Image (spheres, rainbow, N blue to C red):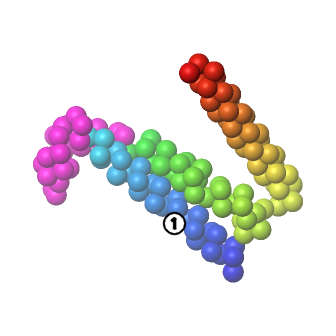
Amino acid sequence: MKPILFNLYAAIAQLLGCMLGIFGAFGACVPFFGSSVFDTALGSPPDYSHPALWMAFILMFPSLFIGAAGAMALFVMPVAFRFPDWAHVAPYQRGYLDFLRSYAESILRYVASEEQRVSMLKKHDA
């Protein structure tokens, strides 16, 4: 039952990430054309001659893929790393997951040591 739940979770996370990317493409038109663009150019029916609609269409696919990649990185991969049995990870992939986990831990250790070093420098400067 757990792999089914994981696959459902991954599919929903990917769908929501893609939708967030699409909505972001249409929202990117607001700083350039104002919030009234949702009523005029992007409204129902849309105004095909307005540049905001074409800008949203051009930005839609790249932002869709960015949203999907972000959902994978922020929501699916951490769960797959935490519960590898749920994701049906093959034995040779578990080594790869262990490597990625150790690499992430080494980055976190480095960041913690840099934060400590900077705080020590601030104490000596004061």
Is disc 1 placed on a helix, strand or loop? helix
Q: Position of residue 98 (x, y in %)?
A: 82, 51
Q: Position of residue 113 (x, y in %)?
A: 71, 33
User: Within 10 Å of the Cα at label 1, are there few (<14), some (14-19), or many (20+) other Cα atoms?
Assistant: some
41 sits to left or right of 97:
left
9 sits to left or right of 44:
right
123 w.r.t. 98: above or below:
above
Q: Position of residue 68 (x, y in %)?
A: 51, 51
Q: Quadrant of residue 102?
A: top right
Of the pair 51 and 105, the residue shown nearer to us:
105
* Residue that lies at the very extreme toward the front in this rendered image: 126
The quadrant of the rendering that contains the C terminus is: top right
89 sits to left or right of 78:
right
Of the pair 65 and 116, the residue shown nearer to us:
116
Q: Position of residue 5 (x, y in %)?
A: 63, 74
Q: Residue at x 65, y 55 (%)?
A: 77
Of the pair 57 and 96, the residue shown nearer to us:
96
Find the magenta span and give its range: 30-59
Q: Residue at x 55, y 65 (%)?
A: 11
Q: Quadrant of residue 75?
A: bottom right
Task: Look at the image and say whether residue 52 sits in the magenta stretch.
Answer: yes
Q: Residue at x 69, y 73 (%)?
A: 3
Task: Look at the image and say whether residue 87 sits in the magenta stretch.
Answer: no
94 sits to left or right of 34:
right
Whether residue 41 is visible, yes or no, is no
Q: Label 1 is placed on what type of residue?
A: Ile
Q: Residue at x 69, y 80 (%)?
A: 1
Whether residue 18 is visible, yes or no, is yes
Q: Which residue is mark 1?
A: 12
* Residue that lies at the very extreme toward the bottom in this rendered image: 1
The number of numbered discs placed on residues in the rendered structure image is 1
